[in-house]
Every structure is written in C-alpha cells, then in structure tokens.
Amino acid sequence: MYRRYIKRLLDLIISIIGFPFFLIALIVFGPIIKATDKGPVFYNAKRIGRNGKLFKMFKFRSMYVNAPDIRLADGSTYNGEDDPRVTKVGKFMRATSIDELPQLINMLNGTMSLIGPRPDPPDWLDKYPEDIKVFLTVRPGLTGYSQAYFRNGADGEQKMKNDAYYAQHVSFLFDVKIFFKTIATVLGHEGTYKDTSSEEEAVKQAEALKK
C-alpha cells in the first residue's frame, strides 16, 4: 500500500510544499550562476529512471560550462574538494545540497521520489548485474539510503548494493530514517567529497540501519 500509493502521494505533497523554497533559491542563486560564466542556470542531465527508462534530471549548475566528465576507476563521477571544474558558488551549493532543489520538478512530474536510489548516467545501465537491477523497480530519489549514510563515500559497486537493499525493503519507517539521516549528513557536511577515511564509519552506520 505504501510503496504503490502512499509514497507517491507524499511525494506530491512534499514537492508542492517545497516548491516555494526552490523558487527562492532560483531568485538568489540564479543570477550568481549566470554571472559566473554567462552559462545556463540549470544543468539538465539524462539519468536512468524507474524500469530503466531515461529521464531529464534538473539541477542548479555547479560547474563551469563545458567542464569535462571525469570518472574514477569504478566508473563513478569524480568529486574532489579541490575540483577546478566547480565554481565558487557551486561548491557552496554542493555542500548544502541546494543544487538538488530543482529536482522538486522531477518529484512533481513523477520521474523522481523524495527517497530512492540516486539516479546514474545512461552508460551505467549495461553495468548493472542482474541481481542488482531490482532497484530499478522504484523511482530514483533526491536522497536515498546510500546517499544518506555514505553520501559520496561509497564506490560504484557498494552504491548498487545499497540501492538494491533499499528497493527490497521500502517502507514508511525506512524512508523516515533516511530522511532525517540525510538532514544530519547535510548539516554536518558529511561525505560531501570522496574521503576513504570516513568510509568505515559510514559502513557501520548503514549496517546499523539494517538491523
């Protein structure tokens, strides 16, 4: 019942309530982003959605125009503290997750949920093992189990396993725990950048949630 109907209803209610905050962020940060290098305010990226269908995900642009796509050995996107591709305002937006606010539009149109696996780029679709693809049965989220407990600390393989675990255990209580953990993670600036020194503690916290 929750997974099929209530979760989507809550997404609509929350996105409507949160939309004014997105508009305020647009008014404040839009001109700054535009003035940085005269590029677009939004970064519209193709991502893998529910049932493997591609959709357009909205974000405030945090990188300079035409910044190269840099990947790590595991295929995940590079995200370093001193990444020269990221603008000054972009670093602030990433640290506070303000750059994700435009995804309220995705929540409204049903391509994303508040809680769910963070969506991957299209080229990841062929990399998913068959036993992992179960997470494609749920809508991708603004935040999720892996995002809340690992943020950018998990490698590609661990993220997929976390996403699969979430899809197999979707519940209202699980989503509530993820929601409040996300707030604590963002406010504490945990895992904003990839940092292996914090990975062990993140694993402990994530494993504690499974019990």
Image (cartoon, rainbow, N blue to C red):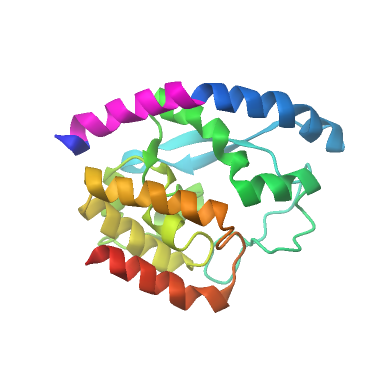
Where residue 147 sits in the image (x, y, percent)?
A: 45, 55
Where residue 48 sits in the image (x, y, percent)?
A: 43, 44
Q: Is residue 69 visible?
A: yes
Is 92 on the left or on the right of 15, as rendered?
right
Q: Residue at x 49, y 47 (%)?
A: 122
17 is within the stretch colored magenta: yes
Which one is in front, 161 or 67?
Answer: 161
Position of 57 relative to 90 (above/below): above
Residue 34 position by quadrant: top right
Q: Residue at x 80, y 48 (%)?
A: 88
Position of 19 relative to 130 (above/below): above
Q: Residue at x 22, y 30 (%)?
A: 6
Q: Residue at x 62, y 63 (%)?
A: 193
156 is within the stretch colored magenta: no
Position of 85 relative to 111 (above/below): below
Where residue 178 sits in the image (x, y, percent)?
A: 36, 51
Where residue 79 sits in the image (x, y, percent)?
A: 64, 61
Quarter of the figure with the C terminus: bottom left
Position of 43 relative to 170 (above/below): above
Which one is in front, 121 or 203?
Answer: 203
Q: How many badges with numbers are in the image? A: 0
The residue at the far left in this view is: 1
Residue 145 position by quadrant: bottom left
Q: Is residue 117 visible?
A: no
Quarter of the figure with the N terminus: top left
Which one is in front, 177 or 100?
Answer: 177
Highlighted magenta segment, given as a residue range:
4-18
Which one is in front, 23 or 60?
Answer: 23
Is 30 on the left or on the right of 120, as rendered?
right
Q: Which is the main secondary structure of the residues drawn in magenta? A: helix
